[in-house]
Image (cartoon, rainbow, N blue to C red):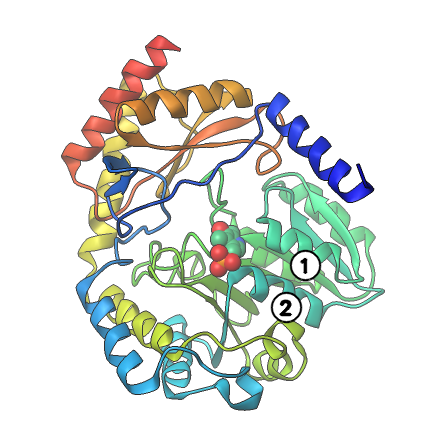
Amino acid sequence: MEPFSRRLQESLDRRHRDGLYRQRLTLESSQGPVVRLAGRQYLNFCSNDYLGLAAHPKVIAALRRAAADYGVGSGASHLVCGHSAPHRELEEALAAFTGRPRALLFSSGYAANTGVLGTLLQRGDHVFEDRLNHASLLDGGLHSGARFQRFPHNDLSALQARLEAASGPKLVAVDGVFSMDGDSAPLAELAGLCSAQGAWLMVDDAHGFGVLGARGAGSVEAAGLDTDTVPVLMATLGKALGTAGAFVAGSELLIEGLIQQARNYIYTTAQPPALAAATLASLELLQEESWRREHLAALVKRFRRGAGQLDLPVLPSTSAIQPLMVGEPEHALALSERLREQGMLISAIRPPTVPAGTSRLRVTLTAAHSEGQVDRLLEQLAVCWRGA
Ligand SMILES: *Cc1c(COP(=O)(O)O)cnc(C)c1O
């Protein structure tokens, strides 16, 4: 076999052998608490549609309306002629909602994170990242040209030691809510440490935005921080907002710098204008209807109480992400498959997404779930765990 095919085949074989082979599910319905797969209904506990807005009638209507007015494709990158009124309106609304001077849309969170880090950092700088950060933050830091250092999860004294030992421009980047563990970064303490050390703090709030904070503006709002203390805020639109894309919010200077220099912003087609209009409708729902956040918080409490009574290995998370620690990938996969036979969709998360030996079931709750559905989940988990 020639080298590329051989390498691909070997890596596939290795994944099969190690229980790490991944398969895609093909949904035949919209996202929601109940989804259809191969003609069968499943209770869905693995989406990031935390507020249940991905198929909300008002969001769908906004997309339809804007498609009638603006068509489907944006036709070009933002800097050529792909930037349209819905993009602009959404950027202004996101800036106002996060209380920041400006916001900039990106086509994905992955592009936003790698774009920001690639723009801000250069050789001679230092970037510090929590070791459990999302892959896009880690990749952005690794490829930035700056000296890249990971610190142990949420370990402020380890970070402080690394910051003190470094000279030159320093940036600290963390997830607001960690995507596979569901716990939060200690943002207030991190902000204090960063300002004492003259470092910038960047927060990726993919899982906090729309869910946490008194108004739903996320982890940074919940921690009482602002543009001075967290100069770079990034969040995605494909999770709680139920659409797609991402944004970065910060100072006039940061946003103008990104528009001029971020390669992931400049050299890519703008997201469809109708998608921006749909996100604007989601953002309005988020601001007008706080019951979704409240219901979700109540479901999280209910799940944790039930899981505690059943002695299930829940991690210390108060977010919508409620992982159950398993350990070995084959075991996590077997549990996930057993649950699927019972009509429950819960994904097994395995390396390299999580460190070796920490394979888990990642349960996610959404505002669209009912109390009864959470109770069903607990019953099935109890049965499957006993059989394990
Ligand atoms: C999902 C996610 C991203 C990537 O966002 P996409 O829009 O899906 O590319 C970035 N950071 C975190 C923490 C995420 O969970």
Q: Residue at x 56, y 26 (%)?
A: 358
Question: For this rendering, which residue is in front, 203 or 165?
Answer: 203
Q: Position of residue 166 (x, y in %)?
A: 81, 56
Residue 188 shows in the view: no
Mark 1 lies on residue: 140
Quarter of the image where one finds residue 69: bottom left
Rendered position, 205 above or below 382: below
Which circle marks residue 63 in the picture? none
Q: Amino acid at mark 1?
A: Gly
Mark 2 lies on residue: 115
**Mark 1 vs ligand 1: CB under 8 Å?**
no
Question: For this rendering, which residue is in front, 278 or 30?
Answer: 30
Q: Position of residue 36 (x, y in %)?
A: 26, 41
Q: Which SS class for mark 1?
A: helix
Quarter of the image where one finds residue 303: top left
Side (left or right) of 274 relative to 55: right
Rendered position, 260 above or below 174: below
Q: Amino acid at mark 2?
A: Gly
Which numbered disc flags the more N-terminal residue, 2 or 1? Answer: 2
Residue 11 shows in the view: yes
Q: Which SS class for mark 2?
A: helix
Quarter of the image where one finds residue 282: bottom left
Location of the C terminus by quadrant is: top left
Location of the N terminus by quadrant is: top right
Side (left or right) of 160 relative to 209: right
Q: Residue at x 71, y 39 (%)?
A: 8
Check the image and name the residue furthest to the front: 1
Q: Position of residue 34 (x, y in %)?
A: 22, 41
Q: Residues within 10 Å of mark 2 (few under 14, many from 20)?
A: many
- Contact, CB < 8 Å: mark 2 with mark 1? yes
